[in-house]
Amino acid sequence: MKFFKWSAGAATSLVALLAISGISAESLMEPATGFVSKGDSLLSTGDVSGALEHYDSAVRIDPENYLYLFKRGAALLSLGRDLQALKDFDRALEIGPKFESALNQRAKINLKFGRIESALDDAKGLKAITAQNIIESAAIYSNSLQQALKAEKKGDIEGCIAHASEALAVSPNSLEMRKLRAKCRISHNDMREALVDLSHVQSLTPSNPESFVTAVKIYYYSFHEYDSAMQTLRRCLQYDPDCAACLKVHRQIKKIEKKISKYSKDSLAKKVAEHEVWKEVKTTLDQQNVYKDIEKDVLSNLKEVGTTGENSGLLRDLQQILCEAYYNTKDFKSKQGQEYCKIAFENDRTFATAVLYQASVEMDKDNFDIAAQILHDFQQSTGIQDHKVASKLREAQILARRAKEKDYYKVLGVSRTADDKEIKKAYRGLTKQFHPDKYRGQMTAEEVERKMADINEAYEVLSDEEKRQQFDNGHDPNDPNGGGPGGPGGNPFRGTPFHFQAGGPGGFHQQHFQGGFDFGSFQEQFMKQQFRAQSR
């Protein structure tokens, strides 16, 4: 170990040297051993950065001391600065080739980076037990590497990921394995995990733009995370401001953002239904084919990355915006509205507007229980108390309960949104069809009687605004307690809005059933049929 003999001339010369080296003037008269001693003291308290500063000062005073180089390398290694540490270990071994501690640390670093041959060469100079650990780890890495490559070649993506992970457990900084696992993870659509590997690749080869461009495309096209994409691009351009590949993808993203930034979810969040912006969204994104053009860009870029656009976050966000635009303009049952809302629901069942759309679709098919379940699942999975969802859920539950009992809308054959004119028209048609004097079908007189009772009862409720509102709210105004007029033992014509008088019914029936309805004759015929039926 070398020591310095201080003299005025030597000190003067060293002042200039150490000033250039960055050592303060106050420490000029302190020997290297003093810095090492302070570094050791700081290291014992866990202050690795402080220790590094003192070891660095010692090395600058005595650059040929392999022990000082080793101590600085060990501190660098503790701080994760492996490649800088490797340089110190290399230099220490040049000075002291048999320094086993440096040899062991260098072997571990080489193994960590997947430099198997170099690690095995270093292991030759180590004690048997220490060397054996290096040799066994190197064998695991080499075997896993070969298995991962074979799996990837056969298209066994899960096998590729598993074997690459085994190799990386031994050599986490292996550039080859990071690249391979990133590729297989992308093929498996494990994009978040792929970004972790790509981040390592960027650190290992910052001058290569490929991993930066791939990460940018995943962030933007797969996740629609604009800020993360821009941050990655900045790192790429920091290493090379003129990088053609990074500048190209930057232009592509800016071009898309210029078209859609105005219609971001945040900017549309507070826009009420029927707001003009929703029509603008439909016109710009859909009718002017902006969405279709972006879709082509997404599919093209993600194909280059090695995946499909099936789960593209950018497309998903645009689909949701378009679904919301069609829903808020009451146009979601149009072909385009159905297209966007259907795919939005399939991709994300926590998106309230698509959930409302799908519930409406099921309710239109009288699948009220299914609609209620869809809405209930949304509330349970998100914890969001959306008032539109809650209102739709109540409606679906009412209709589901009503479907199991009686549905006046179904009796008249009209939709729940039918107006008074449609209801009256349906009623007139049915009374003509099932008038006891006019009916010509397979139904018995009793069945016709019950049918007319149901028709009249339905019309009585739906033609009265107050009663209809009660029914829509889940309360049958004619059957509040489970019983009801028109049931067994009840008057089949109770509730009819037409009053039969001595000369036959007047009003509507006189106009449409020429001669009127001979109620007395009908009752007589009905009693005769009842008697004949009982006598058989």
Image (tube, rainbow, N blue to C red):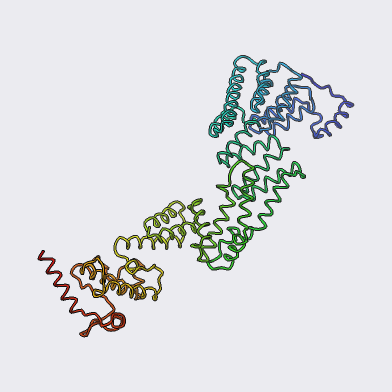
Q: Residue lying at the far left in this picture: please name it.
A: 535
Q: In this view, does 390 lie above or below 101?
A: below
Q: Residue lying at the far front in this picture: please name it.
A: 440
Name the image quarter holding the C terminus. bottom left
Q: Residue lying at the far bottom in this picture: please name it.
A: 503
Residue at 73% x, 38% y: name it.
207
Image spot of residue 201 (x, y percent): 66, 36
Residue sitting nearer the eye, 417 or 222: 417
Residue sitting nearer the eye, 182 or 115: 182
Which quadrant of the view contains residue 37? Answer: top right
Image spot of residue 448 (x, y percent): 24, 69
Image spot of residue 18 (x, y percent): 83, 31
500 sits left or right of 250 in the view: left
Which quadrant of the view contains residue 367? Answer: bottom left
Residue at 85% x, 30% y: name it.
17
Residue sitting nearer the eye, 189 or 48: 189
Q: In this view, does 395 lie above or below 171?
A: below
